[in-house]
Amino acid sequence: MALLEVKDLAIAVAVGGQLVPVVHGVSFTVEAGKTLGIVGESGCGKSLTSLAIMGLLEGSQVRITSGSILFDGQDMLTLPAERRRAIMGADMAMIFQEPMTSLNPVYRVGEQIAESILQHRKVSKAQARERAIELLRLVRIPDPEGRVDSFPHQLSGGMRQRVMIAMALACDPKLLIADEPTTALDVTVQARILDLLKELQDETGMAIMLISHDLGVIAETCDDVAVMYWGKIIETAPADELFSTMAHPYTRGLMASIPVSDREVERLEAIPSRVPMLGEKLDGCAFHPRCGRARPICSDIDPVAIAVSPSHFARCHFPGEDQA
Amino acid sequence: MATIGLIWLCLVLFAAVAAPLIVPFDPLDIDPVNRLAEPGWPHLFGTDHYGRDTFSRSLYGARMTMFIGVGSVVFALATGGLIGMLSAYFIRLGNFLMRGIDVLMAFPALLLALVLMTLLERSVTNTIIVIGIVYATTTARILFGMTLKLKREVFIDAAICSGAGHSSILFRHILPNLISPLLVQASFIFAFAQLQAAALDFLGLGLPPEVPSWGNMLSESRIYVTRAPWLLIFPGLLIILSVFSMNMVGDAMRDSMDPRFKDDIAGV
Amino acid sequence: MLAYTFKRLLALVPTLLAASVLVFLFVHLIPGDPAAILLGDSATPEDVARLSREMGLDRPIYVQYFIWLGNALQGDFGTSVFFRTPVMEVIAGGAETSILLALLTMVWIILLGIPIGVLSATRHGTWVDQLASGGAMLFASVPTFWLGLYLILIFAVWLGWFPSSGFPSIHDEGGLLNLRYLLLPSMTLAAPNAALIIRLVRASMLDVQREDHVRTARAKGLHPARVAIKHVFRNALISVAAAFGFTFAALISEAVVTETVFSLPGVGRLVVQSILRRDYPVIQGVILVIVCLYMVINLIVDLAYAWLDPRVSLK
């Protein structure tokens, strides 16, 4: 059984009393100890999906309209709030895009890590502090005994993201959801944070769900990849298979728009046109207005997922055609 | 809510303009026979201890409300706004002027007003000036902060580079950006000024006693509160409704305002 | 911390000096001979001439100011024209009432303002929020004296639950029970200020609620109430504290009115009565004392602000 199994998850945003669908029934699984990458442009619904899994949509304008989220065999959507909170921050933890603002500025980082430990484990404050120092050491923060009493504003962005990771690891999660964990950081720091996540995964055996708009980041870290476009998963495959044979024209477009520094490029490809507006009504394949290979059928019928290989699916009428 | 507030303020404005035409009685006419008459016909709001018609006096009171409100807003925004903008723009001058504002702000608002009223005669103009001075200080400080922020923005650099003069930058580039915060500030000053003026009237240091303002009406009839509670109900409710409406309007305007300045204006 | 406080206290000196110049000039700005003004209407020309000499009115005005300031620094603001006693004693006589009134009012403000503000923010958009924030706006729009008069009418005159005016010292017969005289005044004074605090707490909590770190706190699996108090309210307190100086100024202003309505023998009513009696030495003394107090409170607010927000460095 998979650690996390998301089935037909649909999410809508309440705008002026109306529910506008933004995620149209996505399904995927995360196996224990593995890394799933979810990639897509901003606004494709990948962040909303991760927040829905974590249970952080409550109290906002966003509603889960259908589907199920099975974590460790339990449906997170029907679980009573209290039991759900017992999982949040313990078995399932999350780190966010903005390390600069994701820590509370008025508490010391040690207190913030300890808060998570004290919430889920029956330990004394002193023990929680010891554990916080240990965690800071685990995420390779130099001088953890001193840093444990720092305030967030005294740390750099990379350090803060390490603190966020330490906080997420506080109760040995089985699943770590990382929503664009490196986007706000310098390029050199990005690589170090990704390496750290990889190493920690090897040490702890946790699964990671990595959300990114950057195929490069995904390629470096993931076992499996799901590509999202306009609230749908349009291609899923093991990472090595995806990067060798991209079946969906959107995935190929994403790849072509990555600048590659070690090779001369005549012209950086951009995907033409724009992403349809959220909640816009669209017949056929959501990508057809931007697709260079669109044919009449593409604007009429929304393609179902077609198996390219036993582990590789693409929602395209003509998967793998015109491959470069 | 803000719409209801706006409608009420329009009614007050109408009453203020049309008071002489629509009042059923002369607000100054004394009628010893009908002293402290209860609300009813023909005295809708009853009469006071001189037998004057409270309804007519209330309508005339709307006039004072508008005079005081508009007068102190204009005074406060003109003087305070200019001081604040110039101080931020010419920062050397500003350091000097803003220290002066600091000194005035060391006096709590009503206290400053009381001290100033001691020096001046009780009159409508003086009340407006005194309340205007009190709120000019806060306005100056707020506009000082906002102008400083604007000065750092690229479009001001662009204007300087294109050779615009000081007055052109101040009044054609900076001021238009401050119009909406100024309007919000104006609505809050209007509201505060009403309460301040009423308090001054009550303490016997505001408008001359013969002027039919809502504050004076409350002040005069307070010793009759047990015998004729309605004398305080009507002017009191009129003040509350007007201040409340103005606060509501200010609040709604602030919510829709440029987020850069939202935190600068302390209203209710 | 100590060095910072000392530095801030030093920074107060120029403002305070400038304020004292204004307070000093105040008597000289009133048309007429200051000696005659200080002595009041009943003074004979001989008295006026004698006081003129004593006050050194024949000397240059800046010399007069420094003499006056020197005395004021030693707590000597001269003699009250009305009471014929030292101004400092007159002010001290009103201190007990005003301080107790202020403390009692603070209790109301904190007891009402903070919980209702928190409730309003956590139930944002519901009828509870609309009632609380609308009600707060309404109370902030009520003239203090009007509210006071109706509280007297209802609770003192009609119901007879509380005394309507005056305040015997808690050292007199009755002891602490005499505080009941301050119940209605403190409620009157608290109403508009608690309203201010409610709106302030609500607005800053709503701002903090949108911040990313609150999402982090929720992701830890904390109970919503714990998130609201430890993360949202705690951070909102920073801006509430910053605005507290403003509230205190409003409190002083409204205390003047409230003490007058309830005929309380406090410093606030002393200001009004001294103005009406043209008792200038008392006016000068009281105003200067209040300005000092207000500035010290502002300093305490700034220190509290720095203490609440670790990002503010005390340098």
Image (cartoon, rainbow, N blue to C red):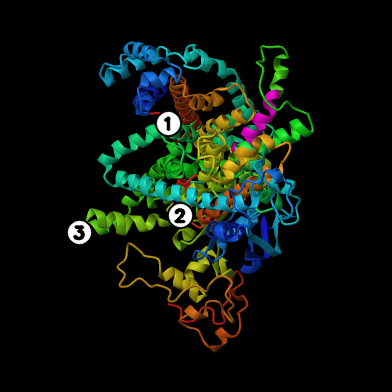
Residue type for callout 2: Leu
Please name the residue that numbered disc 1 is placed on.
B106
Find residue B183 and name its label: 2
What residue lies at 32% left-to-right and 62% top-to-bottom? A262
Query: Which SS class for mark 3?
Result: loop
Query: Which SS class for mark 2?
Result: helix
Magenta-colored span: C181-195
In this view, C280 is above or below C141: above
In this view, C289 is above or below A272: above
Q: Callout 2 environment at 10 Å: few (<14), some (14 to 19), or many (20+)? A: some
Residue B107: x and y in percent read 44, 31
Residue C2 versus residue A221: which sits nearer the camera? Answer: C2
Residue type for callout 3: Gly
Q: CA distance from mark 1 to mark 3?
A: 40 Å
Q: CA distance from mark 1 to mark 2?
A: 26 Å
Residue C260: x and y in percent read 59, 29
